[in-house]
Amino acid sequence: MDKQIKATNSAGPNVGLSSPNATPVSDLKLSDAVVGPSILAMIREGGRPMVIDWISEEIDMVNRLCGGGMDQATVTMCAELILDRFKFRTANALRIALRDGLNSGKIFGKLTYPLIGEWLTAHEEAVEAMNYQQHLATK
């Protein structure tokens, strides 16, 4: 993965996601989903192909954890679809959504894009609920 992708994490704002100093996905909290640059900002900085490669790596890891039912062309297509749908969220948000999806236990058979889409939707709902609760706390 290209070192140009940056994430704000405990190691600092200039650590690439593939860096050994990047925050492990298991340590990320829901509040970390709104920390760091958006995926769209990463596209502007490093280009769409570089971000597609990064998302493909993330999806490929999830694919392998689910038994490896997707070939590389399918993984890349999923990355393209996720990029179009999720580009206004952060890299941490995508990583958290995939982690929480894996931990949900709702994987019946092979990994598919519709299943990943459900994970992303569930994550969006959780982030919006968190933001709403924070808003109510300020009233």
Image: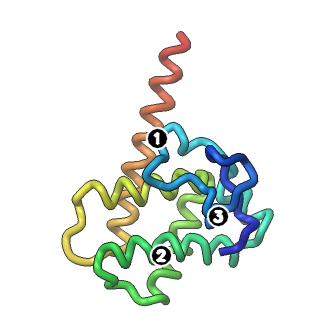
Q: 6 or 114: which is nearer to us?
A: 6
Earlier sequence position, callout 3 versus callout 2:
3
Residue at x 39% of width, y 71% of height: 62
- The mark lying in front, picked from 1 and 2, is 1
The residue labelled by disc 2 is: 78
Query: As drawn, which residue projects farthest toward the front?
Result: 20
The residue labelled by disc 1 is: 30
Percent position of residue 21, x then y: 63, 57
Percent position of residue 36, x then y: 66, 47
Placement of 21 over or under 18, stated as above or below: above
The residue labelled by disc 3 is: 19
Q: How far, Cα to Cα, is label 1 from label 2?
A: 23 Å
Percent position of residue 102, x then y: 32, 61
Q: Amino acid at mark 2?
A: Cys
Placement of 136 over or under 11, stated as above or below: above
Q: How far, Cα to Cα, is label 3 from label 2?
A: 24 Å
